[in-house]
Image (cartoon, rainbow, N blue to C red):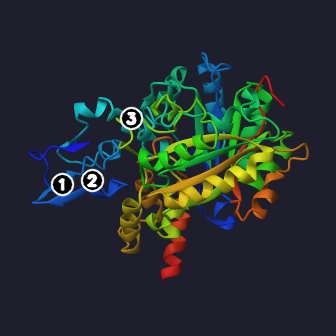
Amino acid sequence: MSHSLHRFGTVEDLKNDFCIYARCARGVNRDHPGEKLRRILDIYLSEDFVNFGSSHAGKSYVNGLDPEDYKETLDNAYGIIISFADRNAVKGVLTKIRDAQLGISIVVSGLIDEVVNIAHECGLKPHTATLSLGIFGNKSLLPKDETLKITTMCGHSLIGTPLVESTCEKVRQAKLTPEKAAEIIAKPCTCGIFNTRRCAELIRKQLENIN
Amino acid sequence: MRIDPARCLGCNRCVDYCMLNCISKADNICTIKEEECVDCGVCLRANVCPVHAIFMPEECYEYPRAVRMQFSDPGVQHPALKAWGRGTEEAKTNDVTGKFGKGEYGLLLEFGRPCTGTRFTEVEKVTVAMRKLGIPILEDNPLYGLLESDDSGRFKKEFVNEKVLSAILELRIHEEELEEIIGTIMPLLENVDTVVSVGLVTRFDDDAKLPVAEKLKAMGFTVRPNAKINVGLGRPLID
């Protein structure tokens, strides 16, 4: 899955948007990874995270997933992912995972220059990148850019235009705060890579542009 | 997915949760257009139906329909790969698998993303062309098992009209083939009735640079400023 790739936006509004994915490899280190994944989760949670989740549990942290309940399921998992809105938190996580020497592959999604700089600050040598070349095909099927910035934060495409636009409309009508709207929009994204802080900020900017 | 008409109150609360606009209201009840639905389960998990009228019918678990949820619900394990969702490791574990080596690229064509969905007929427009050109389709990918065994790039007839939220076609390209293969495949995407998010896997050089970015720019692509980066913490490391 390339689900944390293709997050749409400008450099400015992507600068506080990171995902970190720890992923075991089939045939290498995927048998019985529970203990290592629990250690990684503890490291994730020791920093200022935004959201994480479980597709198997069908919910994310911002929609009620209990970290302790989640930990107990990790014997049957092979990867855990979390979202951050702060480079210092990403740096903290990478430093701690480096020191723990767990041998699990770690992937960071974010602005390329920023992630490479953070990796260097942690003494790491970036190995492989997956670049986004954008969207092709019948682009008339896409929503407006401001909606796309929000929907593409769910890389499994589970958050669609109707939910984003109807919820943003409730913010415009002062029925919801941007933060509450972000929580509602985040609900279908069960793996938890939806960055609710960035979403609230994007909604706030939409409002400023209208007013 | 289906909505039980005997229970539905027609309250509309589920409608906005369908990213493919498959739920509509008529005669005071909501219905799901099942031929267009990809069985992702979002409307059910949203838990907004006050009378629990939304459910997954038994036939959605039977082949060929079952591939819909396998490709569309990340909580459903893909049986061929024992992996969830679309189920490919691509570059995430490349530091320990070496799936994409130096001098190689991975091209990832994700049909249906974002939020459009795709039938395999649209993917087939590319897989058939790939096979005519002798480009292999990677086997450790959920799509591989749905293809005919005759190497034509065609999907088995029972699957070809099935619809999924997204499906990733993966290619391994040698450095010297990049222009030719991308130049052949990208025009095919102009004729698909869906959207395709395109990614490219590449190794960093020893100076932590990505030389392919300049090549892509020269070919007319805009490389987005954000990416997924494997930071090389896996062990044993394949450098």
Task: Please name the residue shown 37% across and 59% down the image.
Answer: A163
Query: What subunit carries mark 2?
Result: B
| Residue receiving disc 3 | B67
Number of other residues with Cα within 10 Å of mark 3, as a class: few under 14, some 14 to 19, many 20 or more:
many
Q: Are marks 1 and 2 on the same chain?
A: yes
Which residue appears at 40% of the width and 55% of the height?
A: A184
Task: Report the quarter where the N terminus of chain A lies.
Answer: top right
**Chain that bears disc 3:** B
Label 3 vs label 1: CA separation?
25 Å
Comes first in the chain, label 1 or label 2: 2
Amino acid, disc 2: Cys
Quick check: B181 left or right of A124? left
**Residue tagged 1:** B30
- Residue at coordinates 61% horizontally, 50% vertically from top-left? A5
List x then y, in percent, for residue A35. 62, 20
* Residue B216 found in image quarter: bottom right
Give how far across and how far down residue B69 sits, in percent.
Answer: 37, 37
Q: CA distance from mark 3 to mark 2?
A: 23 Å
**Residue A175 visible in this rendered orientation of the protein:** yes
Residue, disc 2:
B14
Instruction: Give the mark, 3 or 2, whose residue is nearer the N terminus.
Output: 2
In the image, B20 versus B216, the foreground residue is B216
The number of numbered discs placed on residues in the rendered structure image is 3
Give the SS element for disc 3: helix
Please tell me which residue lies in front, A179 or B54.
B54
